[in-house]
Structures are given as structure tokens and as C-alpha cells.
Amino acid sequence: MLDDEARQLRLLIDGVVDYAIYMIDTEGYLRSWNTGGERIKGYTASEVIGTHFSRFYTPEDAASGAPARGLRIARDEGRFTAEGWRVRKDGSRFHASVVIDPIWEDGELIGYAKVTRDTTERFRHEARLDHARDALLQSQKLEAIGKLTLGLAHDFNNLLNIIINSLELVDHYTPEPKAKRHLQGAMRAAERGALLTRQLLTFGKGHALVAERHAVERIIDEAMDTLQRACREGVTLHARLEDGLPEIDVDREQLEAALLNLVSNSRDAMPAEGHIAITATLRHCAPPYAADQPASRFVCIEVSDDGEGIAADDLARVFEPFFTTKDIGKGSGLGLSQVFGFARQSGGFADLKSAPGAGTTVSVCLPVPRESE
């Protein structure tokens, strides 16, 4: 029979298993406990009643006075609401939505009603959505920059071809040694401009890739001598490649250029001594800009260093053409844009993780052909 009002209330509160509902006194000590509290936090009533509710807070929040602050706000403003991390009996953390209401009797504060809900899954889902949204916006931004870059690079390339052809013609009919030296200097500058233009075309997807079936391990092994020479004294380089990687369709020359760009960037990020590691692994994932797409297989090549790292404010711009964190005159700002354009044009993606003082890791993930799956 449910004719006892107090018993009805007790059964109602205990029947709510998705919320921890309990009372605490004016000093913060627990006076009741429900089934939801046991399910969410792992404690039985006998373990927590009479103890202080600050035990559910993280050590850093407890040390900062968060429990007392919540009670004070509830008392003074009529309610306290918050979201944050809490601690279960086993020490694991969960994300919680918390409400504290003061309980008054004849104008006197006699305690608080506290309701806690486990929102960990919602919090993580929203974090994943935010990350995917940010990655998509960044990808769209780079695509827009790429279209602008493509038009400029084509025009610049046409002008350079005219300049190079004219210099070659003049050089052919100029016997004067001093004039020839000047012409050769102009030719080297024009060829450097042509190289930069090719990098821009790759970023803007205007440079046709010649994709052929290759084993990534073989490409990296055969490129190691060149990559080692790009490292100055005091900087070591080694490769660690996963066994049995599937072959992929890739433009070998562009992949080698991407590796050289990444190794050179890592070298420049280490003013003195340092270490660079190249790894290649098989991943089953979705591109960061399309996290809702079905996962597929990628061969992911990572170049990591223990250099200075990159400031958080610069991370969103590292793949933009002409953006560089190097000192003026020490970088064109096209190395990482070439890597980004090559990865996207190959059907994959590039990613960068870094923090000041913690080094940098750049990933180039290239798709595995379906027939190789």
C-alpha cells in the first residue's frame, strides 16, 4: 500500500536510477542517499551518509573551495547549477550536471537538496562534434585559399616560363663570361620561383599527380640517405615502419618532396641537438574534416621531432601557403602547404599536433586502395 506519504516519497526517489538525489545538511554532510547515487557514483548509503559531499569532487576542485562555493551560491541566490568533472568510488572521473537547492523551514535554512546527473556521453559527443566542425571549417577555409592560390600560381607559372625561356635564349647567344654568370644567377632565381610555383599548384590541386602502386616502406628506405643529409650535425633521424603495410597508389616524387619538407621543418625547429622519427602505420579511421563518415584504411606516415613546438594560436594556420613560424628569410611558408595539398589530392589528409616545448608531429595519411583491403 502507498498510503504513507513519506514512504511514497522514499520509493519515488529510490526509483530514479539516472540521477543521484540526496540531502546534505548546512555544513555539507550527507543525510540521505538514493539508488541513482549508488549506480552513478558507486557508493552504498552506509558508505557515504554522514560523510562530506566534497568527496565527490576532483582534488583540484575540492582544494579551490568549489563545494563550499556551490552551497553559498545556492543559499544566497536560491539555486546553484554547474557542470564539471566528479569522481566515482573507484577513482574514475565522470562529467556531471549538478543542481543544488536550499531547503528552508520557517525561514531557517536546514539543508540542501542535491541532484547529480552523469552527462559524460553527451559531453564527449559534443566534444567530437565540435572537433569535427572545427576541422570542417578549417578544411573549407584551406580549400578557398587553394582556389585563390591556384589561379595566381597558374599566371605566375606562365610568366616564369617566358622568363626562363628568354634567359636560356640570351645565355645561348652571350659569350661574355661575366654576363653569363649574371644570367646563371637569374636562371637559378627563376628556377627557385618555378619550384615555389609547383608547391603552390600542389596546394591548390592544380599539379597533376602521377600515382602508381608503391610500397611506402621501400620509398622511405630509399629516401633515407637524402633525408639524413638534410639533417645537420647534432640532429639524428631514424625510421620505424610497421611490417606488412599494404601498397598504395601515390606519386612517389611528391611523397619524397613531402618527407623532405617535413624533415627540414623538424630540423629547423631544433636550434641545437634533437631527434626526428619517421613512422608508418596502418590506421582505420575517418578524415578529421569528415568524422561522421565510415572509417576506412589509411597508411599514415608521421614525422615527429622534439623541437620547440608551435604556439596554439598558430596551429590553425600552419597549412596555409606563405604562413610560417620561422624567422623572416628562413622559410617560404610553402612546405606544409605542399604536404597538405599532396595529401588531399591523393585522397587522404594531413594533420599536425604540437605544443610549445613538446615538439611537433605531422601525419600524412594516404588511402589504401579497395582491392588491397
Image (spheres, grey):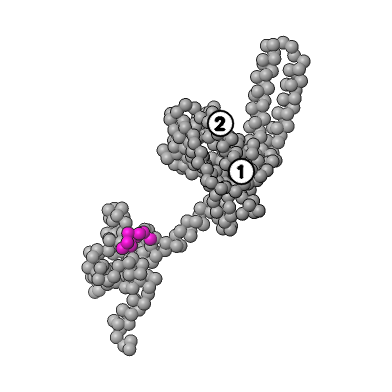
- Real-space CA distance between mark 2 and mark 1, rounded to the nearest whole angstrom: 18 Å
Q: At 60% from the left edge and 36% from the top edge, which residue is drawn?
A: 256
Q: At 36% from the left edge and 59% from the top edge, which residue is drawn?
A: 93
First in sequence, mark 2 or 1: give its number.
1
Quarter of the image with the N terminus is bottom left
Q: Nearer the viewer, residue 101 or 18?
A: 18
Q: Identity of the amino acid at label 2? A: Asp
Q: Residue furthest front?
A: 244
Asked whether 329 falls inside the magenta stretch, the response is no
Q: At 22% from the left edge and 68% from the top edge, which residue is drawn?
A: 50
Residue 317, image quadrant: top right
Q: Identity of the amino acid at label 1? A: Ala
Q: Which residues are magenta?
A: 86-94
Q: Which mark is residue 215?
A: 1
Q: 10 Å neighbourhood of mark 2: few (<14), some, or many (≥20)?
A: few
Check contact, mark 2 vs mark 1: CB within 8 A. Answer: no
Is residue 78 depicted above or below 323 in this figure?
Answer: below
Q: Which mark is residue 225?
A: 2
Q: How many marks?
A: 2
Picture coordinates of residue 44 (x, y %)? 29, 70
Picture coordinates of residue 68 (x, y %)? 27, 59
Is residue 79 depicted above or below 272 in this figure?
Answer: below
Question: Callout 2: helix, strand or loop?
Answer: helix
Quarter of the image with the C terminus is bottom right
Q: 10 Å neighbourhood of mark 1: few (<14), some, or many (≥20)?
A: some
Asked whether 91 falls inside the magenta stretch, the response is yes
Question: Callout 1: helix, strand or loop?
Answer: loop
